[in-house]
Image (cartoon, rainbow, N blue to C red):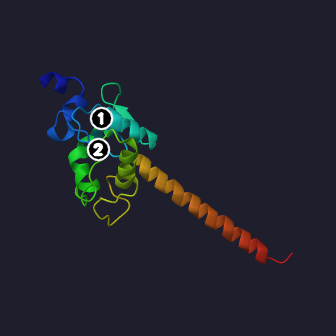
Amino acid sequence: MKAAAKGNPMDTLRQLPENKKCFDCQQKGTMYIVMNFFVFVCSACAGIHREMTHKVKGISMCVFSEQELKDITENGNENQRAKLMANWKAKNNPIPEKTDTARMKEFFRHKYVEKRFAEAQEDSDDSSDSEEERRRRKKRKEKKRAKKAAKAAEESSDDEPQ
């Protein structure tokens, strides 16, 4: 453990009890981090996240910035479970077998896209949102404003006498 602490700080974080098991399927052995949510996952689940266009980084292969390390430390599997799975009930929505890829994808969609099991959010600008999610939201707002401005300009030019 001391060697891991001196070497890769990600190895130290991965050795925490809550990060030893995959956030999605509970298999032991987390080799990847989903940067959109800062959770530790196994190889199979990392593949599904990539298909969903989530940013996935290999723990042993990638370099992590200080900000990424801070975000991962502040979030991780335990904190994200409290957020993303706060209202999840195993008897109503059991975690599918990881060999059933179609059902796993559907479960991921419920969990990450639809946020069916997440705690209620009072404000959409939650600090746990990744920088990428905030940028996407900002870009959508800017596009919406630009459309409204273009429409307003078009309407005002239609009203002017020729």
Q: Quadrant of residue 16?
A: top left
Q: Residue at position x 33%, y 46% from top?
A: 37
Image height of 10 relative to 88, above or below: above
Query: Mark 1: few, some, or many residues within 10 Å (few <14, many ≥20)?
Result: many
What is the residue that sits farthest to the right in this orientation?
Answer: 162
Q: Is 159 on the left or on the right of 97, as rendered? A: right
Q: Nearer the viewer, residue 41 or 58?
A: 41
What is the residue that sits farthest to the left in this orientation?
Answer: 2
Residue that numbered label 1 is attached to: 42
Q: Nearer the viewer, residue 140 or 85?
A: 85
Question: What distance separates the C-alpha of mark 2 from that of mark 1?
Answer: 8 Å
Q: Is 93 on the left or on the right of 125, as rendered? A: left
Residue 55 seen in the figure? no
What x and y, as percent, mark residue 143?
58, 58
Q: Is 99 on the left or on the right of 156, as rendered? A: left
Q: Residue at position x 32%, y 37% from top?
A: 33
Q: Residue at position x 18%, y 25% from top?
A: 4
Task: Say the numbered circle drawn on residue 24.
Answer: 2
Q: Quadrant of residue 87?
A: bottom left
Could you tell which of marks 2 and 1 lies nearer the N-terminus? 2
SS at circle 1: loop
Q: Which three-letter amino acid code belongs to the residue tagged 1?
A: Cys
Quadrant of the frame with the N terminus: top left
What x and y, as percent, mark residue 47?
39, 36
Q: Nearer the viewer, residue 139 or 33?
A: 33
What x and y, as percent, mark residue 94?
26, 52
Q: Nearer the viewer, residue 49 or 160?
A: 49
Residue 96 seen in the figure? yes
Q: Which three-letter amino acid code belongs to the residue tagged 2?
A: Asp
Q: Are marks 2 and 1 in contact (CB under 8 Å)?
A: yes
